[in-house]
Image (spheres, rainbow, N blue to C red):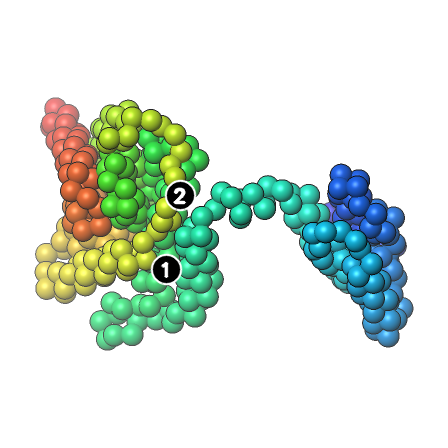
Amino acid sequence: MTGVAASSLWGQPEWSLLAALAIGLLIGAERERRKRETDSHRPAGVRTFALVALLGGASAMIGPAMTLLAGAFVAAGALIGYGLDDRRERDMTGEVALVTTFVLGVVSRDRPAAALEVGVVVAALLAYREPIHRLVGETLSEQELLDGMAFAIAAAVILPLAPNRALDPFGLVNPFTLWRLVVAVMAMSALGYVAQRVVGARFGLVAAGLAAGLVSATAAVAAMGQRSRADPTLAGPGAAGAIASLFSSVGYMLVLITAVSPGLLRNLVAPLALAAIATLGYAAVLARRPPDNAPGVAPAAAGRTFNFGQAIAFVAIVAGFTALSRILEAWLGATGALVGAGATGLADAHAAAVSMASLYGARQIDETTATLAVLIGLTTNMLVKIPVAFTLGTRPYAGRVSAGIIVMLASLWLGFGLNAVLGLK
């Protein structure tokens, strides 16, 4: 069925009523099972919910006056049922669900697909009552709940309100960009925290690092540093996760260069592949070692999901290096693409790589210059991560991350050297 035909079908009144009926049956089925499980004598079951949904859909077709009258009748019935209920533990879930079913029946008159989607969500919320209660009441700590609220405020309230423009004449201070980076660091730290609690420290942080590297390896290094500072026994696993993010970042760079200028890969495959293999091997070595002073691999106990102050400190470091890169470009811009790539790499290795690949694709620079520029940008970006690790993480964590970065860069330039030697032959 085509999109136009489906849209036309949903517009028919009988299909709107059918959607309302489906909503009532779905929510009512859950309520009926709940009533039987708790041996409750509440009047609203599957038939009542189905009829209430149909009442909402039919009254919406008649007009606003009928909708208000029917809604008042349903609300009054729900309140009377709640007042007559003799349960010891009272809650209004069933009554609210009944009124919600009526409202969804009304909505199905004009937007049946949306009403049906919301109805499925409502039924799921009711059906997963016990797991949700356990999650909120037993699994989540108060601090985790507060951290979740703080993240929601940062991502859903503050970020959309931040002005997306530079506030200084040099174009360096963009509140939206900087705050988005704060949110990214918080998200990376939360991802590592959840993985650590679910899988365990040894492998949970590595999995989180692999995923985080596709977004921001620098943010991953900062987030893993926060984990190590919150729990010093996680210096090794946190470093493994940080190094794993570098592996993902290199793979992402290969994909970007392939998309922009596949011809440039000829000189980059060997250096990047060798660096990726060495990085992954080093991360595996770190992950195989159990957490310091913690021989078990059980999921971690509840703690802080992220540290807001450290996230701000990380963004301040990145902003400082961004300003330094702009100053270098303004001062030494005449020296060409190599200095520009190195300066850009201080803030974003992927941006430097894409810029050089684009210039090479447009034949504005030669292949050797483009290759060197990509590697220089990646090198400066990796070096930036060392002060980030020392600033936000413990010394054991920073030392292991720094050693991994040195291994990666040595492999990177060894691959470039081998390419050059083979090219001379």
Residue 313 in the image: x percent, y percent?
A: 24, 58
Element type at mark 1: helix
Q: Nearer the viewer, mark 2 or mark 1?
A: 2
> Can see residue 377?
no
The residue labelled by disc 2 is: 302
Asked if 408 appears above or below 165 in the picture, the reply is above
Identified at 43% across, 56% down, the residue is: 146
The residue identified by callout 1 is 180
**Quadrant of the rendered image containing residue 174:** bottom left
Q: Residues within 10 Å of mark 2 (few under 14, many from 20)?
A: some
Image quadrant in which you'd find residue 409: top left
User: Percent from the top left, x then y, of residue 187?
Assistant: 39, 50
Which percent across, then down, holds residue 314?
A: 25, 55
Between discs 2 and 1, the one toward the N terminus: 1
Q: Is residue 237 visible?
A: yes
Q: Position of residue 206 (x, y in %)?
A: 33, 34
**Which residue corresponds to the image point at 10% horizontal and 56% vertical from the top-left?**
335
- Residue drawn at (34%, 71%) of the image: 165
Hey, what amino acid is under mark 1? Arg
Where is residue 104, by image quadrant? bottom right
Q: What amino acid type should be assigned to the residue bearing mark 2? A: Ala
Front residue of this view, candidates 38 and 287: 38
Q: Which is more toward the observer, 383 or 394?
A: 394
Image vertical order of residue 249 relative to residue 156, above or below: above
